[in-house]
């Protein structure tokens, strides 16, 4: 009986156990599915957040890389700036050092200048002492040398005075019995002819002042300049010409040409027609040198004289006037004038003075070397019948 009771109890336990197990299985299955879904949802949410975080992380990493690159570049520039600053500081220090050295040099220079001035003062005082104590024999030798030089100067003055007197005698004495104006009209040409020849020189004196006509004669060129409102004055050694010019209202003095130029302080231009052939080489050089010294910059000197490069001048002009000393070759006069210092010296063979003749060309078809012959004869013609006058045009 007892065994039956125990068997019943075991059955009941087994039954209840099965019920409980079934209930638990059902409960666990339901809860497992619910929890699984919840976990899956949580995992999906976590996965989305992880993906978002990864995307953000990548964006942050890209920004960080750009920031890192920028900062590296910035640091590089900062390093360059620091290097420049260090170099500038070094340069400034060098400049400061140079400035200090310059100040020391300036100070030394000032001190040296003071010392130099003292030395110069001492030197000046020593020179005065030496001058005051110089040997009388040395002073005497200097006086003797000065005396010798003065004697040579006096000799030159006597020679120049002699030449002047001789020239004055030639002009005033040799022609004392004749009318010199008539003489020149006959052999040089009338006043109108001379005027026609000289008018071409006016262009060289346009806009000038203080022009001087040396050996102005009858004052023809002075009249031309007056008509062109060019202030001018003249000088001549022949008294009748001077008087005639003054009667025409022209400013003309009776004096030796060289002495007159020596008195001038300012010459704006100089004209001398048919003068230098009356002078010695020494006088021509003195005339040129003095004119250059007295002339202003840009002034022009014109020296017109007979042309010895053409034979006609000897047969028809030069030796008719006994006061002529010698003809002056154009190249010689050009050289003498250039040695005085003129920067531009030209030779003008005046076309108005050309002798009215020439050797004509031969025209033929049967002569050998005809061209060469005619060319040579043209050269001969120029030598025989070329310009009887030439002019030196010299500009300071």
Image: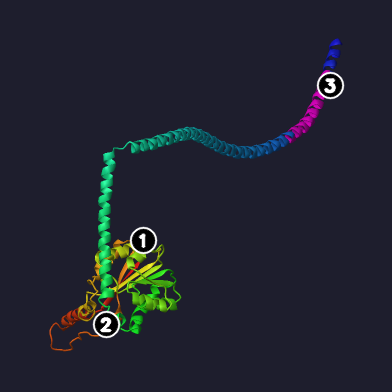
**Helix, strand, or loop for circle 3?**
helix
**What residue is at 63 percent from the left and 39 percent from the top?**
63
The residue under the point 29% across, 42% down is: 139
Identify the residue position indicated by label 2 in the image: 187
Mark 2 vs 3, N-terminal side: 3
Q: Quadrant of residue 254?
A: bottom left
Which stretch appears magenta? 13-41
**Most common secondary structure along the magenta stretch:** helix
Q: Is residue 244 left or right of residue 336?
A: right
Task: Give the foreground label among 2 and 3.
Answer: 2
Q: Earlier in the sequence, mark 1 or mark 3?
A: 3
Q: Say left or right for 31 vs 253.
A: right
Along the line of sight, the residue nearer the viewer: 199 or 97: 199
- Reading the image, the residue beneath label 1 is 293
SS under mark 2: helix
Q: Where residue 275 sits: x, y (%)?
A: 29, 72
Residue under label 3, please give it.
Answer: 16
Q: Nearer the viewer, residue 209 or 188?
A: 188
């Amino acid at each position: 009986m007892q065994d039956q009771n125990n068997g019943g109890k075991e059955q009941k336990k087994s039954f209840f156990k099965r019920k409980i197990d079934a209930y638990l299985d059902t409960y666990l299955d339901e809860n497992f599915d619910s929890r699984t879904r919840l976990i899956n949802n949580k995992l999906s949410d976590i996965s989305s957040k992880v993906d978002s975080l990864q995307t953000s992380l990548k964006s942050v990493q890209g920004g960080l890389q750009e920031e890192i690159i920028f900062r590296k570049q910035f640091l590089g520039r900062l390093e360059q700036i620091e290097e420049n600053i260090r170099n500038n500081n070094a340069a400034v220090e060098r400049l400061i050092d140079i400035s200090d050295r310059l100040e020391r040099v300036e100070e030394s220079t000032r001190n040296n200048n003071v010392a130099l001035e003292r030395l110069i003062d001492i030197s000046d005082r020593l020179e005065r002492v030496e001058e005051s104590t110089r040997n009388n024999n040395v002073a005497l030798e200097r006086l003797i040398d000065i005396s010798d030089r003065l004697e040579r100067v006096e000799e030159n003055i006597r020679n120049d005075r002699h030449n002047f007197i001789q020239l004055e005698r030639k002009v005033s004495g040799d022609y004392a019995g004749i009318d010199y104006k008539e003489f020149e009209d006959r052999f040089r040409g009338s006043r109108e002819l001379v005027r026609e020849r000289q008018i071409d020189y006016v262009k060289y004196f346009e806009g000038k002042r203080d022009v001087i006509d040396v050996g102005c004669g009858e004052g023809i060129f002075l009249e031309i300049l007056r008509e062109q409102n060019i202030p001018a004055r003249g000088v001549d050694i022949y008294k009748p010409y001077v008087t005639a010019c003054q009667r025409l209202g022209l400013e003309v003095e009776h004096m030796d040409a060289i002495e007159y130029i020596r008195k001038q302080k300012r010459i704006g231009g100089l004209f001398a027609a048919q003068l230098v052939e009356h002078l010695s080489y020494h006088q021509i050089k003195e005339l040129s040198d003095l004119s250059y010294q007295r002339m202003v910059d840009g002034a022009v000197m014109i020296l017109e004289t007979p042309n010895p490069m053409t034979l006609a001048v000897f047969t028809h002009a030069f030796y008719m006037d006994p006061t002529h000393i010698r003809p002056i070759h154009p190249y010689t006069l050009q050289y003498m004038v250039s040695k005085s210092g003129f920067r531009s010296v030209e030779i003008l063979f005046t076309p108005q003075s050309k002798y009215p003749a020439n050797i004509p060309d031969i025209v033929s078809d049967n002569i050998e070397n005809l061209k060469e012959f005619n060319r040579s004869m043209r050269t001969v013609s120029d030598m025989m019948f070329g310009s009887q006058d030439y002019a030196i045009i010299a500009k300071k």
